[in-house]
Image (spheres, rainbow, N blue to C red):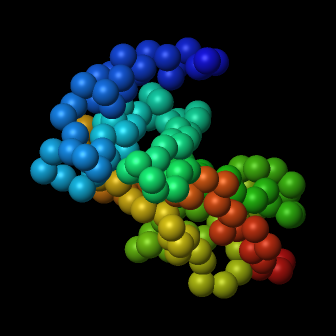
Amino acid sequence: MLVPRNIRLFLPTFAEYAFLRAVDSHGCLLGTRKTNLVDAVQRTFGGREALAHTSIILIYRPTHGHPMESQEFVMSTRYKPWGYNLPSCPSCGNGAVNAPIRFGVATVTCLSCRRCTDGPGVTVPDGVIPVKNHKDPEDLGDRYYWRPLNAVSPWLNHKWKSD
Ligand SMILES: [Zn+2]
């Protein structure tokens, strides 16, 4: 198993939450409807140290006999809203762009020439689920998300305002 060093540090904690907690016959933590693996990923990796440079992919079978689930746990920042890479500015060609999520809507703006994408902006894509993380002091309730594995970027084919 090949694990980056910054992730390797978290593995004992992940193992503790994932395998040493009491679960019911559905693989959920006792008294909840949350599976122990999902909980373990959120508790262990829900922080800047782990997620600033990577995402966590969880492939698991929620219950015996059910199909496999593939989900990606991502951190959202103004440079990577909902964990998606932003398109480069077509005028400057540089990647110095950002898209803070304001009132649930994100519009890409170039930090160099201020050109921005056209239209009303992008709202949270389908299937992207916010996660509360009370361990993170900067938690605003929407910094961490689960999303379908290999979800298509909402900025694919997004148009930029003309000059
Ligand atoms: Zn630009």
Identify the residue at horizontal 58%, vertical 35% (top origin): 54
User: Can you say which quadrant of the picture contains the C terminus?
Assistant: bottom right
Q: Is residue 98 above or below residue 46?
A: below
Residue 91 horizontal/vertical position (percent): 86, 63
* Residue 118 x/y as whole percent: 71, 80
Q: Is residue 147 left or right of residue 62?
A: right
Front one among 12 and 76: 12
Residue placed most toward the observer, 125 or 12: 12
Q: Is residue 84 above or below residue 137?
A: below
Spot occupied by residue 53 in the image (x, y as percentages of width and height): 58, 33
Q: Residue at x 83, y 80 (%)?
A: 162
The quadrant in which residue 145 appears is bottom left
Up-down relation of residue 36 to residue 113 (above or below):
above
**Residue 138 visible in the current orientation:** no
Residue 89, above or below 61: below
Choose top left, top right, bottom left or bottom right for residue 14: top left
The quadrant in which the N terminus is found is top right
Query: Which residue in the rendered view is the most extreme toward the front?
Result: 65
